[in-house]
Image: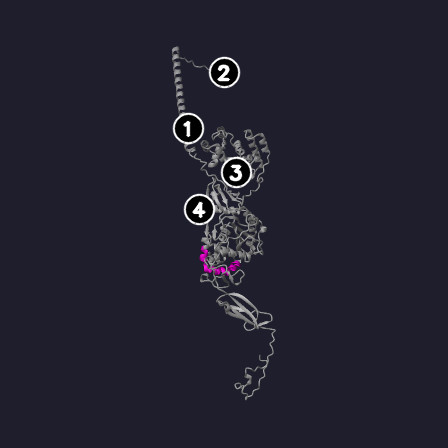
Amino acid sequence: MRKPSFKLPHIKLPHITRSQAKHAAKTTAAAAGDLFALILRAMGAVLLIVVTTATLFACIFVIYVKTNLTGGLDISLEEYQMNLSSTFYCIDDNGVKQEVATLQSSEYRVWADYDEIPEFMRNAIVAIEDKRFYEHHGVDWYRTVAAFTNMFIGMRDNFGGSTITQQLLKNLTGEDQATVTRKLQEIFRALEFEQRYGKDDIITWYLNEVNFGGSVYGVAAAADYYFGKSLDELTLAECASIVGITNNPSRYNPYISRENNKTRQENILNEMYQQGYISHEEMSAAQAQELVFKRGENSKYTPVIYPWFVESAISDVVTDLAALRGITRSEAERALYRGGYSIMLTMNPRIQAAMDQIYTDLSQIPVTTGTPKQLQSAMVIMDPYNGYIVGIVGGVGEKTVNLGLNRATSDLGRRPVGSSIKPIAVYSLAMENGLITPETMVDDAPMELSEAAKGWYPLNDDHDYIGLINIRTALAKSRNTISAQLLDKVTPAVAYRFMTQTLGFDLDPRDEDYAPMAVGQLTVGATPREMASAYTMFPNGGVRTEGITYTTVTDNDGNIIIDNRPVRQIAVSETTAYWMTDIMRSALQWGSGTGANLGDMPAAGKTGTTTNNKDRYFVGFTPYYVAAVWSGYDAPEHIYCAAGSPSVILFKKVMSIVHSDESITPIKQFRVPENTSQTPVPGIRVVDYTVRYVSGGEVIDTETSQGRVGTEITVKARDFDGYTPIGATTRQVTLSGIASENVFTFEYIDDNYVPPTPEIPDHPEYNPEYPEYPDYPNYTDHPDYFMVGTR
């Protein structure tokens, strides 16, 4: 089979000469040149646009940086308020300053100056966090470029590359957003920051500001929290261990993982060696050192428990700060917890230890029966002369919570005070106003008071009366009737005003009445602190001194911002204070408070018992200290204590220890004023009266008593063996003001008496003719005539 054949048509091409070809070539070259020129012009235009745009963007960026990234660079370390923990101190008997407690809020901080931070600590943080810290000017460009490369190429948002300066700024401002804007802002801030502050300032602030796990901030707090040490006690190994926590506290915290912390520590020590901060021998020794932490791995955190005294001082400082600055208590509390203040307490550590020795040991607390409840008690001890409260306990047993019920000083601890109110609300006022002296006679008997009492009159604790007694006995024996009689003369209004305005009690307005003022049945009650402050007027010559818990509050720069001085006020005269003290000494010698007697150390005081024995009070004092003690149950009920008043017992236990060292508290007497004389106040006029018991002209016995002049009394014949009273055995007599008229005699016959036989005279029988008896027609009527048996 033959393949098909195709023939192309014949085409005739035009003839081109050489000149035409040259012309065509020139034309083509020109066209190409024009195109190239056009391309060059276009490229130039594009380049111009790019350069112009870049310049414009650069200008915009500069403006943006200036207005947005550097607009907030005004960060002043001088004005920055770091959250710093406040610390409480006290002075012991030898004048030595002691730290008592450091407040811990949500952030536990303790400031440390540059020279207080160990060199090992400074070098460790630089070696592991920012090895070119002393070379750069706030930004490590090598690390910054690497960080941005990591961001754009690796597509990661954890920039890294931050220097110590940048980290400090982040901590100070709290700005840590993972954005380009913030990173750029941080860079510019760091550059400017290092123009204003030196490396020493920056490293100091960083090591005080950085977090070391949980609520712990700063190396000083970390040293205490993890090792229980101050900074100057830390070793190289411990410094590296603490520094290792900062990178990731939840991973490297030794209380979470000892292994992770150890690994990080060894890495830091190796970096320090590689960078020349330590020798190989130092590195090896530090890596080999056993780290001894305050508590074990994954162990339960035990919060710091503040002493009763510190909690009372916290409340006082907050109150005073709020008043000083015109802020709320909440704001003042935040300022105290975060302001880094130093507070000097009035606490005496020796006395506080004596109180804690008794009160924390439940075996020392008096045993009560009738209820499974734990008997509670609170105590305040004061120096009556300077107003310093030297010891406080707000409850019995070990203290396990912070800011719980403080029965010694808080308003929630107010309880009725019973008869311990009598010396301050009644007797002192009555004596000061010339109504009584210690020897004024009064009548412990039922009677009606003025109409203002509305029929109120108290019973005595023993539900009995003992009649005429003097004021000393009335107070020493705590006779309620006498307190009521005296208050009736003083008036409840005057007593209430004296208690609230002069003695500083915060009482309920309903306490301006007989029962609250006469026998201490207060509506809400008082605190041991108030009672101790009130009793300071007795040993202090009539001057009542307000109790204080602290003397100064100093800021972190050493400036005193509160100079706390006690308020003093003359309450009664020196003479009244002296005699009231003397009477209350009798109460401890032979009255209701004998259990509180301190032996050779002079002491005085007054007991107090409330209705149904639900509260027991005792307020006592020596020439050195005043102490107020309350005992009872948090939910009030009857106290059954066979040993006596729990408050009296606890007073003696504590105060015996307080006064046990004669080198500190040698025996001395209460001070005696120059003038102790008082104008006699007879009160009830009393006279002696005598009852004579006589038989046949012979006195069997006599009794002499005292009675109130003008009153009707009953005298009774006594029973004597072998004697029988003649006539009435009781008589109602009125006592005369003349003692000789007050002699009353009862006649008795001797049961064994045999009368003699009478001689019967001879009488003539009747004879009308006898002239001797003209007037006696019946001779038996003659007076000389006696018939036998008629006698």
- Foreground mark, 3 or 1? 3
Q: Residues within 10 Å of mark 1 (few under 14, many from 20)?
A: few
Q: Which mark is residue 58?
A: 1
Along the viewing direction, whichever of 126 and 144 lies nearer the viewer: 126
Q: Quadrant of residue 237?
A: top right
**Between discs 3 and 1, the one toward the N terminus:** 1
Could you tell me residue 539's position as x and y percent?
A: 50, 52
Residue bearing the label numbered 4: 323
Q: Which residues are magenta?
A: 471-497
Looking at the rendered structure, the kind of residue marked 2 is Lys
Give the residue type at disc 3: Ala
Identify the main secondary structure in magenta.
Answer: helix
- Above or below residue 408? Residue 274 is above
Percent position of residue 703, x then y: 55, 67
The secondary structure type at the circle numbered 3 is helix
Give x and y (percent) for residue 172. 47, 36
- Residue assigned mark 3: 220
* SS of the residue under disc 1: helix
- Tag 2: Cα neighbours inside 10 Å, few (<14), some, or many (≥20)? few
Q: How far separated are the C-alphas under marks 4 and 2?
A: 122 Å
Q: Residue furthest top?
A: 18
| Cα separation between marks 1 and 4 | 55 Å
User: Where 730 falls versus 488 (above or below)?
Assistant: below
Colouring style: one colour
Which amino acid, by three-letter code, is at mark 1? Ala
